Image (cartoon, helix red, strand yellow):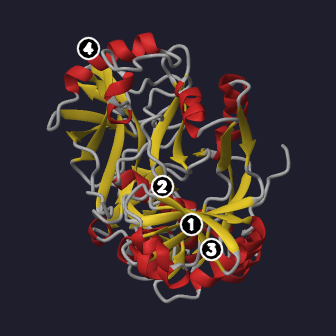
Amino acid sequence: MPELKRTPLYDLHTSLGAKIVPFAGYDMPVQYGLGVLKEHLWTRQHAGLFDVSHMGQARLVPEGSVSDAALALETLVPVDVLGLKEGRQRYALFTDDEGGILDDLMVANRGDHLFVVVNAACKDDDIAHMQAGLGGPVSVEPVTDRGLLALQGPEAEAALARLVPGVAGLRFMDVATFDWEGAELWVSRSGYTGEDGFEISVPEGRTVGLAEALLAMDEVEAIGLGARDSLRLEAGMCLYGHDIDRTTSPVEAALEWAIQKVRRRGGDRAGGFPGADRILEELETGAARRRVGLLPDGRAPMREGTELFVGDTRIGSVTSGGFAPSLERPVSMGYVSTDHAATGTGVEAEVRGKRLPATVADLPFRPSTYKR
Amino acid sequence: MKYTEDHEWLRVDGDVVVVGITEHAAEQLGDVVFIELPETETQVAKGDDIVVIESVKAASDIAAPVDGEIVEVNVDLADNPGLVNEDPLGAAWFFKMKVTDMEQLDTFMSEDEYKDMIG
């Protein structure tokens, strides 16, 4: 097994008493002293600081204007990148020729270039995919000399604005560059928790200093991957490799909202991305299965891999599931055949050989609190 | 109190043992969110998985430490699984069982031996 990589915050994590686990090739903190449950609730009530430096950051730098980079990236994603205004960010998907999902990502228009953030486990493939797919006039520059922090929760703005007052002026999915004591921060108002908050790309050598400055504040606690997962599950967000992967299409995954009209049939730039035939067809006619929320009727969590039935017919399976601390109940998401995907449909989940009832539910389980 | 390699504690009271999990086990599990207990009057064999315990992280099983009959289960745990984290050695006992063969208890560890095992 290859040596696990470490983020700039590794020593800080261990000094904070983190439990370290291997994740996507990195030694990462799964929880700190508070534990998953309290870290989750802390983030919903105050502000949680997450080390997401393992994720992939890259700049797509055009020879000419940023619209060249946008049009080039549009050949790899079913998303309106050209229409993304300067200082704005958007969710996107890399698709494959069969219409499956290679990864999900954030893409930001930073004026003279695009900035993307991709999943840690996919980043090498994603970089190669972009280098092969974007062509000569757009250079793909992996950003390997920066850490990435997320500060999430209702008190995130107050905390970060103490160091960088300008961030208070950002709205959800805005991006901008700020100076923090001589360090250039690339800040977006976004996250993976359903809370208001920020994601901050920071020069590697200043990552520890920024994290320590935030953690010194009363409202900020360090939060591990365990709570990151339960927070995003409550927010109905997909975890790549679990809820979405090459075997799931964007329509099956209920991610139609990420495909703007201009890339759909009848749009000015319809198609022109991998798997367009299937994806454009499914946008009009639907898919045979669909990602849905599932609320177990009882208290037993229904975890990834749990098979779902209606009567004797297997109709799907759970792709993420566990206990939702803010809702004080178990929640799951998974794929079911479309004829059983309507909200309120009763299904049965096979848990340890027993059939337990669950109900199809809308996502997210908990409404987001973004500052729009 | 006796301890098993599976991080259970046993308090012996005549031919009945009260069974729970150790502080170390509770800490390793993390926040417990769901517990499924066996039915009373069930005959169980040593090693049978008879309790399901789910934490925020994962599901695990607790095995019957000896042969015997379940005589009582802690119904409070079903309503308040977090007791396992708050008071693993006290209020969060799981079940009481009538032991078929008391000699099966002889192989279990003392507190000092258990502490040595977990380091």
The amino acid type of the residue labelled 1 equals Phe
Looking at the rendered structure, whether the residues under marks 2 and 4 are on a common chain is answered as: yes
Can you tell which of label 1 and label 2 is closer to the viewer?
A: 1
Residue A161 lies, in percent from the top left, at: 48, 80
Q: Residue at x 36, y 33 (%)?
A: A255
| Picture quadrant where residue A317 is located | top left
Q: Disc 3 marks which residue?
A: A179
Name the disc covering residue A281, or none: none
Can you tell which of label 3 and label 1 is closer to the viewer?
A: 3
Q: Disc 2 marks which residue?
A: A229
Looking at the rendered structure, whether the residues under marks 3 and 4 are on a common chain is answered as: yes
Mark 3: which secondary structure? Answer: strand
Q: Quadrant of the C terminus of chain A?
A: bottom left
Residue A3 lies, with reference to residue A41, above or below; the image says above
Q: Residue at x 44, y 57 (%)?
A: A174
| Picture quadrant where residue A306 is located | top left
- Please count the marks in the image: 4
Residue A140 lies, with reference to residue A167, above or below; the image says above
Q: Disc 1 marks which residue?
A: A50
Mark-to-mark CA distance, 3 and 4: 49 Å
The amino acid type of the residue labelled 2 equals Asp
Can you tell which of label 3 and label 4 is closer to the viewer?
A: 3
- Pinpoint the chain carrying mark 4: A
* Nearest to the observer: residue A25 or residue A149: A149
In this rendering, would B64 be left or right of A343?
right
Mark-to-mark CA distance, 3 and 1: 21 Å
Residue B88 lies, in percent from the top left, at: 47, 77
- Pinpoint the chain carrying mark 2: A
The amino acid type of the residue labelled 4 equals Thr
Can you tell which of label 2 and label 3 is closer to the viewer?
A: 3
The amino acid type of the residue labelled 3 equals Asp
Mark-to-mark CA distance, 2 and 3: 31 Å
